[in-house]
Amino acid sequence: MNGPEVTIIGLLALCASAAFATPVKISERFGFDPANSTRFIQQALDSGLPEIVLDDKGMPWITEPLKGRSNQTLYFEDGVTLLALKGAYLSTGHQVLNYNCVSNIAVVGLGRRGGTIRMHKSDYLKWPYKPSEWRHAIMVWGVSGFRIENMTLAESGGDGIELYGPCRDGVIRRVTCDSNSRQGLSVCSARNLLIEDCAFVNTKGTPPEAGVDFEPDRGDHALFDVVMRNCRAEGNAGNGIEVYSGGVDARIEPFSLTVENCVCARNFNAVRVGGGLGRPKATTWPQGYVTFTNCTFLGSRDYAVRIDEKPKEAYALNFIGCTACGNGGGVEGTEVLFRSSAVPGWKPGGITFRDFTVLRDGKPRPWAKWVTTQNHEPKDLPDVKGNVRMVAADGKSPAAVEL
């Protein structure tokens, strides 16, 4: 048998042994301290073991900030909680789990209950803590290949999850972000990202307080091949889903963001898109598309959809087969607000509402309004296309509006 054959056989044997290796329980290999297990968890993360498990000790694992490593999956046994140590996280940039410029990582909850990371949001809003937006449950910074699945991320001093720096090839699935301070999820930069079967609820504490915020804010950031589907954004103090483009321009890669089969209920606005009021040149807008498909917008305190400063020169914005019902809509009770600045010639444009259904209580009023130096009807917007169907609460008397 020659040398290369030995090498290949050896590699196959190594892969086979790795595939059937038993994940290592952290308490058994490294230890457990009911008062503070930081050193044991960090030793496990630093060990190079491909799979480690926070095993069930009948009480939370209490920790200070932790640093994740490449090529590793951190499992939570069914119902296990990783709890932030009271009095820790004094730095404005401390997170429970920080993955910085690593690759091929996963945080996965097992069983019906999955895993939980919980912080102490109310503590971070008072002395001795300095104000901060970044005390997240999980920080993913410049990571290639990541998966966060079957987890609850609660009561952070920032986001449940933030994706920052150029991140790529990620999946966030069956995750609940509950009662976090700034956002449930912030996506500042992602290529090839799937967000699926998640809930982003009860965000309150630090503006913008959204369920999900898509907000590229550097020249090397992107929203490319990003799909969010079968998710719920509910009860957030801010908007259910926010797409803010004020921090980038046409030099970034074109947007390709699709939100499909999602429900936004009881938020401030269900969806807010735009940003960049006062941008000096229309040609600096980012390109590409942002599309909402088969989404439902319910019970917003303000509008179902608010679109700020989105001219035709910017990326295409599409609402396809969506439904709006019971939203506040300001004093007019409208479902959609277009807002633009007083810069001469700037109008909302490059926007399509196709098969957009508005369920009404029967009162005669427009489905949308455009606010600038003067108020206008949507019919004054030549670059807003599609068709809107208004249906009374009894399901009768549909009225179609062609745009």
Image (cartoon, rainbow, N blue to C red):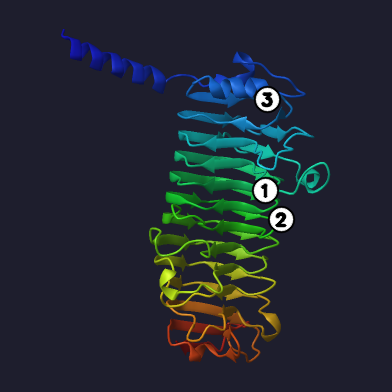
Residue nearer the viewer, 346 or 232: 346
Between marks 1 and 2, how big is the CA–CA gap?
8 Å
Q: Is residue 97 toward the left or the right of residue 321 in the image?
A: right
Q: Are circles 3 and 1 on residues that touch, CB within 8 Å?
A: no
Residue 315 visible (yes or no)? no
Q: Which residue is mark 2?
A: 206
Q: Which residue is mark 3?
A: 38
| N-terminal-most mark, 1 or 2 | 1
Residue 26 position in % (x across, y down): 61, 20
Q: Residues within 10 Å of mark 3 (few under 14, many from 20)?
A: some
Indicate the amino acid at tag 2: Thr
Residue 211 position in % (x across, y down): 62, 57
Indicate the amino acid at tag 3: Thr
Tell me if residue 3 comes above or below residue 203 in the rendering.
above
Tell me if residue 377 comes above or below residue 65 in the rendering.
below
Q: Residue furthest left?
A: 2
* Number of marks in picture: 3
Residue nearer the viewer, 352 or 131: 131
Q: Which residue is mark 1?
A: 158
Q: Are circles 2 and 3 on residues that touch, CB within 8 Å?
A: no
Q: Residue furthest right?
A: 127
Tell me if residue 168 comes above or below residue 380 in the rendering.
above
Residue nearer the viewer, 367 or 217: 217
| N-terminal-most mark, 3 or 1 | 3
Residue 286 visible (yes or no)? yes
